[in-house]
Amino acid sequence: MADRYKEIKENICHYSEADSAIKAVIAIGSTIRESVKADEYSDLDLIIVTGNPTSWYSGEYPKLLGEISIEFVEPTLGNGKEYRAVYDEDKDVDMIIFTPEQFTEAVKNGTAGWVMNRGYAFLCDKAGFSELVREYVKPSVSSPQISELEYLNLTNDFYFHNIWAAKKLLRGELWSAKMCVDAYLKKYLLKMIELYCYKKDGRDVWHDGRFIDRWADDWILEKLELCFAHYEESDIRNALFNTHDLFRNLATVIAEKNGFEYPLKAETTAKEYIKGNREIENNQLF
């Protein structure tokens, strides 16, 4: 497959050689990854180490690389910022901008490893950062861990917000209820899915749910189909019930496998509240 980003990378290397402020340019992500390689939908992920980050945040420097259609800046790891842009019609490029000091600290404290441990390639290195990276960044895959205290806090938070979401439904606040069910609760559900699959056989569970359709068990994927709602009261209610049910199944296994105390009272309280305050219209889960 042809490299869609060849011209952009050539341009950034060209300008980097002439600009003393740019200390390193590093490609990360799918374009250099050996596992789950890039396809026609992949973006270009870069780390830019520069003594002049302002010209990148403003878009001044990125505009030298090609025609930009969309651009914005957001916070990113290691107290840096990420400039994100679409070049032409669909070439999305994410640039994590670090000062040399920020990058050094991010490498040493492990923050940079989170985005570099699946592979990286220096397009430019004028400050010897490659040696630093080789020392601190090691190839690795996702290996989620949780302490009993963290587990208990997470499960209680989840069950607490089961009741919170149910109350929003009773009040007719569909937006708040749906955002809780399909966003807030799902981050905790995803954590349980990751822990379950990793604990089961050391599976590489990636992060933020990436490629979940490849690494999660079939029975989990089948249940997930019922865990997301349309913007409609009864559908949100059913999604809440199904999310509770799947989380409970996973959380009990995690507790058993790790020898953790399971918060049965919290689960029962949440279950009884969301069951008792509204009739379930389509299917009875409890």
Image (tube, rainbow, N blue to C red):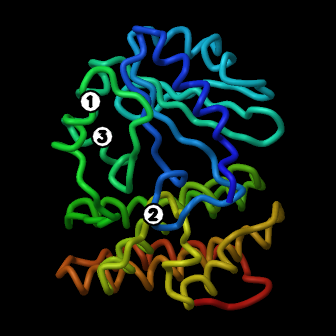
Quadrant location of residue 164? bottom right
The residue at the point 63 percent across, 36 percent down is 93
**Where in the figure is residue 183, as x and y percent of width and height?**
60, 56
Q: Under tag 1, what secondary structure?
A: helix
The correct choice, above or below, for 132 with respect to 167 in the image is: above
Q: Residue beneath label 1, please?
A: 129
Q: Which of 54 and 10 is in front in this view?
A: 10
Question: At 31% across and 19% down in the image, what residue appears?
Answer: 100
Can the viewer see residue 162 in this picture? no
- What percent of the width, then of the height, locates residue 131? 20, 36
Residue 111 is tagged as 3
Q: Amino acid type of disc 1?
A: Phe
Local SS, label 3: loop
Q: Which amino acid does label 2 sit on?
A: Glu
Q: Does 271 sit left or right of 203 as displayed?
A: right
Question: Which is more N-terminal, label 2 or label 3?
Answer: 2
Among numbered discs 1 and 2, the one appearing first in the sequence: 2
- Pointer 2 local density, CA inside 10 Å: few below 14, some 14–19, many at least 20: few
The mark closer to the camera, 3 or 2, is 2
Residue 34's disc is 2
Q: Which mark is residue 82?
A: none
Amino acid, disc 3: Thr
Crowd rating for badge 1 (residues with CA inside 10 Å; few <14, some 14–19, many 20+): many
Residue visible at 55% across and 69% down in the picture: 211
Q: Where is residue 30 in the image (x, y as percent from the top left)?
A: 53, 54
Could you tell me which residue is drawn at 64 percent across and 53 percent down? 42
Q: Earlier in the sequence, mark 3 or mark 1?
A: 3
| Residue 275 place in picture, x, y as percent | 61, 79
Residue 186 as seen in the image, left or right of residue 170 = left
The N terminus is located in which quarter?
Answer: bottom right
Q: Distance between the residues labelled 1 and 2?
A: 22 Å
